[in-house]
Image (tube, rainbow, N blue to C red):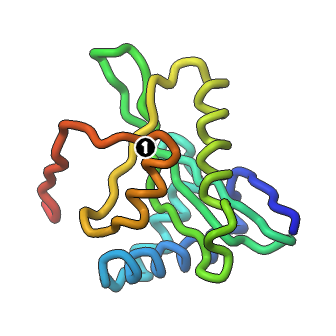
Amino acid sequence: MSLFLRRATSADVDTIAEFNRLLAWETEHKELDRDKLLPGVAAVLADSQRGVYHVAELDGELVGQLLITYEWSDWRNGWFWWIQSVYVRSDARQQGIFRQLYQHVVQLAHEAGDVIGIRLYVERDNERAQKTYAQLGLTTTNYLLLERCPL
């Protein structure tokens, strides 16, 4: 087993879109519109200001991903990196792939020098993911996530 972590490229667009489709279905039973999903992923891959996907390859095949997006904190004069679109292919789970992706991103955040924290959100009912995140040192905040979507 040879795991390789790297920044995603435009060549990964179809797999990342499929992983996102599977993620939405598994976590929320939501069917994503591929006509929006594929260009949405492509937009991130084409413009790092929108975010950066990091992927895990196992023996040359993509088996996992996460997306980093950015939030500037004027209170702290630094960046929060948000982890989103976390997915590990079902046949590759329980092998520490997300843990390695997460540790990779933490290392990149340290190297960046202006990142003050890492955040993510998780479905309230996804206890398995919450347990995994807690084991990695992520803690629950006092903030609630509110939204108005669609606008």
Task: Give the x, y percent position of residue 42.
Answer: 55, 64
Q: Residue at x 42, y 41 (%)?
A: 138
Q: Locate residue 53 relative to residue 7 in the image: left or right.
A: left
Q: Locate residue 125 relative to residue 71 in the image: left or right.
A: left
Quarter holding residue 24: bottom left
Q: Residue at x 38, y 14 (%)?
A: 77
Q: How many marks?
A: 1
Q: Is residue 30 above or below residue 99?
A: below
Q: Residue at x 31, y 82 (%)?
A: 30
Q: Residue at x 36, y 75 (%)?
A: 27
Q: Is residue 117 above or below residue 89?
A: above
Q: Residues within 10 Å of mark 1 (few under 14, many from 20)?
A: some
Disc 1 element: strand
Circle 1 residue: 82
Give the amino acid at mark 1: Trp
Q: Is residue 13 above or below residue 49?
A: below
Task: Give the x, y percent position of residue 13.
Answer: 62, 69
Identify which residue, 81 or 41, lies in the foreground.
81
Task: Give the x, y percent position of residue 126.
Answer: 33, 68
Task: Give the x, y percent position of residue 3.
Answer: 81, 61
Q: Locate residue 144 relative to residue 7 in the image: left or right.
A: left
Q: In which quadrant is the N terminus drawn?
A: bottom right
Quarter holding residue 90: bottom right
Q: In which quadrant is the C terminus drawn?
A: bottom left
